[in-house]
Image (cartoon, rainbow, N blue to C red):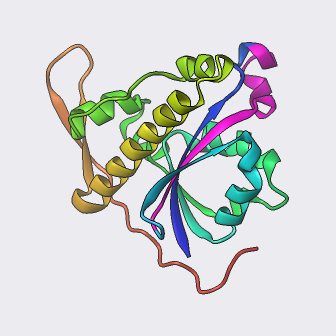
Amino acid sequence: MDKLVIDIETKNTFEDVGGRDGLKNLDVSVVGVYSYDQDKLIAFDEHQMEELGDLLKRTHLIVTFAGARFDMPVLEKYFPFNINAIDHYDILEDVESRLGRRIGLDILAQANLGVGKTGHGLQAIEFYRQGEMEKLKSYCLNDVKITKDLYELIKKQGYLWIPERHTSQMTKLVLPYEEKAAPQSLLF
């Protein structure tokens, strides 16, 4: 069974759907995926959700950054099965539960990987609205790669460096993570 790192981009903003309470009314423009089985990055556009669903049915673990509160609730409506039945590791949820506050993907990437994001979510919506799909896919897949690299770092060393606010100090945040073995049968 596969393991996927996932990040989504949407066509619309919270403002378009009446605020954060309208989260599930957001529509996907692109889903970026890293497949461990295929060892490659894949971008699925809004018309390829059935293909993504087929891949998800063969997946035992989804890794995200802020996916529990954003990506997964938005994706739920696209599949005729319970996407939440797949094991999920959300890096931000783990960091926040141990640190006591949220921290951005860009900040974590710069502190731990020496690289940063190539844009921001609202810029991704503009790419979609302007029909710049290759830029949109590239932006999304870069976030997937960063998330995958942070996940691999957590598995390898068991911690991430967290920059302290308003100082140049870093805190070593221990993140003990042990991946569960893949089940022998499919969930779906």
Q: Position of residue 155 (x, y in %)?
A: 31, 61
- Range drawn in magenta: 16-36
In the rendered image, residue 105 lying in the magenta stretch gets the answer no
Closer-to-camera residue (70/128): 128
Q: Position of residue 71 (x, y in %)?
A: 63, 41
> In percent of the image, x 22 and y 58: which residue is there?
157
> In percent of the image, x 37 and y 29: which residue is there?
117
> In percent of the image, x 60 and y 68: which residue is there?
59
Q: Position of residue 123 (x, y in %)?
A: 54, 17
| In this view, 81 is above or below 126 | below
In the rendered image, residue 34 lying in the magenta stretch gets the answer yes
Asked which quadrant contains residue 163, the reply is top left
- Count all numbered tags in the image, as a single digit: 0
| In this view, 90 is above or below 170 | below
Asked which quadrant contains residue 129, the reply is top right
Quarter that holds the N terminus:
bottom right
| In this view, 185 is above or below 10 | below
| In this view, 82 is above or below 126 | below
- Residue lying farthest to the right in this orientation: 80
- Residue lying farthest to the left in this orientation: 168
Asked which quadrant contains residue 179, the reply is bottom left
Closer-to-camera residue (2/39): 39
Residue 20 relative to residue 89: left or right: right
Quarter that holds the C terminus:
bottom right
> In percent of the image, x 80 and y 54: which residue is there?
79
- Residue lying farthest to the bottom in this orientation: 184
Residue 83 relative to residue 148: left or right: right
Q: Position of residue 154 (x, y in %)?
A: 30, 54
